[in-house]
Image (spheres, rainbow, N blue to C red):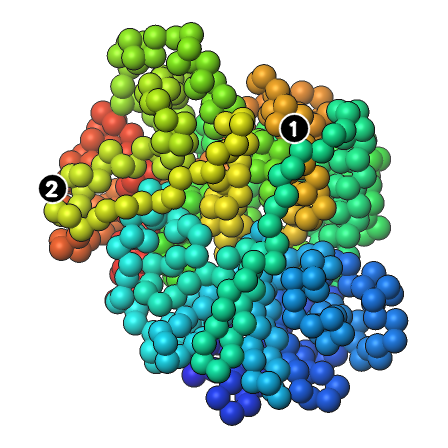
Amino acid sequence: MLLRMADAMHQRGPDDSGIFLDRHVGLAHTRLAVVDLGETGHQPFHSPDGRYTLVFNGEIFNAAELRKYHLPDYSFRSYSDTEVLLAMLLKFGFSAETLQKLNGFFAFAFYDKQENTLCLARDRFGVKPLFYFSNGADFAFASTLEALKQIPAFDRKAHRKDALLDFLSLQYIPREKTIFENTFKLLPGHMLTWENGSFRLDRWYTPDFREKQISYQDACSELTDLVTASVRRVLTADVPLGIFLSGGLDSAITAALAIRLGGQKLPLYSVGFSDPRYDELAYARETADFLMTQSGKKLEHRIVNVESAYALDLLRKMVRQSGEPYADASLLPFSRLCAFAKEDISVALTGDGADEFFYGYDRYRAMRLFRLARIFLPCGLLHFFVPKGRGERSFAGRAERFLRIARMSDERNRYLTIVTHDAKKYFKNLFLDELFSGGIGMPGEAPDPADSAARFDLQTYLPGDVLPKADLGSMSAGLEVRSPFLDHRVADFAFSLPADFKLSGKKRKRILSDAFKDIIPPGLASRPKRGFGVPVGEWLRGDWQAETKRLLLNLPQEIFRRDTIARLIAEHESRSADHTYLLYSLLVYALFAESES
């Protein structure tokens, strides 16, 4: 069984593998070698006396500092950060205080043979995945759901209907739930201790949102130092590195600093589409040209395109690897980019986390505007004069959606309507009878509605959507991705800043663009937010049309109403309505169900 679990994770760690057995406890590890490439980095890793065993996934960027200041007397056998983590646990114990000393991203298991205890921990923001299964008799954990499915007690058919509802609302399953009964995610910043057949959960990291008293100028200076130091740390590797470059601010800052600080050649990688509404290559090329001019270095800028026919095969592959429904369509170009980059490099730098920490999404600004709209605009009247049924990205579509949401009196419901794309409006006719009730939890409140929205995303969207995309896309290609913005010191500093430092009028990520204005292309910060947009709506009408109909019209009739699905498909094809988000989510769920059967 342990061998089958390890085989299910082979794509995540193609360079090495190992297994440890002790009575009723077994540990397996597959390795993507990035630091200490030799045999001394092999896992499972054991303490010198053989009492403790560690399996570790991730990177500890301050490993050298920990060795110097906390472990000067420890006799190291390797240069790996795995052994540094083991030494820290041996000296200080498995505790919140020990974990708080670590700078990096990780998921690990620490077994004490003498006490028969197993301890699991996950990094602050959920960069690395960690799933566990518990049915009262059996306990197992893994980096992937596919590995857990190899245990005899796992029931592939035992699906949670509340998780399906969440998925169709958000395009991912948030917080600790998975689609399967008895199977959970260990939440970010949490640890689990298993002993004598039972376990307990504890939280070891909690963001501190207390506002810091600091001038804007000093805040810019401190932010510059923190991000620069983080970029310097993520450049540590014994393998080739590269940079993922979009047309946006975050990747431009990452690239500019990495090129300045890196001693090795750092190629740039970008992805594009033939549909100009979704293609950012012109912006990416402009940024690349600017970086070349500024640095005086000739940089390789490599580009790959994603087309609809290839993307459907890629979607099937990613559905299998995700292990449960996950319908962020940007996974498709991202995973294609990772596979393309893996031909040259083993580590790629990204800008993940900056949007959540520095308020880069338009919806944060919208939450402020909703308050003003209700005061100054007759939203209820204007709403009826805006054309309906337009594309999601058209001006009319955006205006209609804005005014419809502005009519809501409750700020919490407004934000849930935004992030769910108003999925609730479909559910009455989509599902049979009273199968579904409840739904996702509401965002927490803060004085500024932008703060409330960002804190909600920190608990749900970042660990449930953004970071799983990065992990799935990269590890399917045997590539590691790193983002300097996910350094906890950068994040903690961002949390301490007033909302106006981050969001001012139309300017998103204000302090980030101001702090690094001298190293990014002029006008970049004022560009509209694009992200990894994907022309899925057009693909559903085009190359994907036949397969979409086949799969969606064969969804389980004990759950879904076939007549409703047929109507939604027809309306989308005729362009009388845009049902992209729901139809794509249903397509992913249908592919998931097919792969499970």
Asked whether 26 or 517 is in front, the reply is 26
Asked whether 207 or 259 is in front, the reply is 207
The amino acid type, in three-letter code, at marker 2 is: Asp
Q: Residues within 10 Å of mark 1 (few under 14, many from 20)?
A: some
Among the 4 quarters of the image, the one containing residue 256: top right
The residue most toward the bottom is 23
- Tell me the quadrant of the picture where the C terminus can be found: bottom left
Residue drawn at x 33%, y 38% is 581
The image position of residue 331, as x and y in percent, is: 47, 48
- Tell me the quadrant of the picture where the N terminus can be found: bottom left
The amino acid type, in three-letter code, at marker 1 is: Pro
The image shows a total of numbered marks equal to 2
> In this view of the protein, can residue 288 be seen by the observer?
no
The image position of residue 183, as x and y in percent, is: 39, 66
Among the 4 quarters of the image, the one containing residue 573: top left
Residue drawn at x 26%, y 12% is 384
The image position of residue 23, as x and y in percent, is: 51, 92
Which numbered disc covers residue 31? none
Asked whether 192 or 545 is in front, the reply is 192
Which numbered disc covers residue 563? 2
Which numbered disc covers residue 498? 1
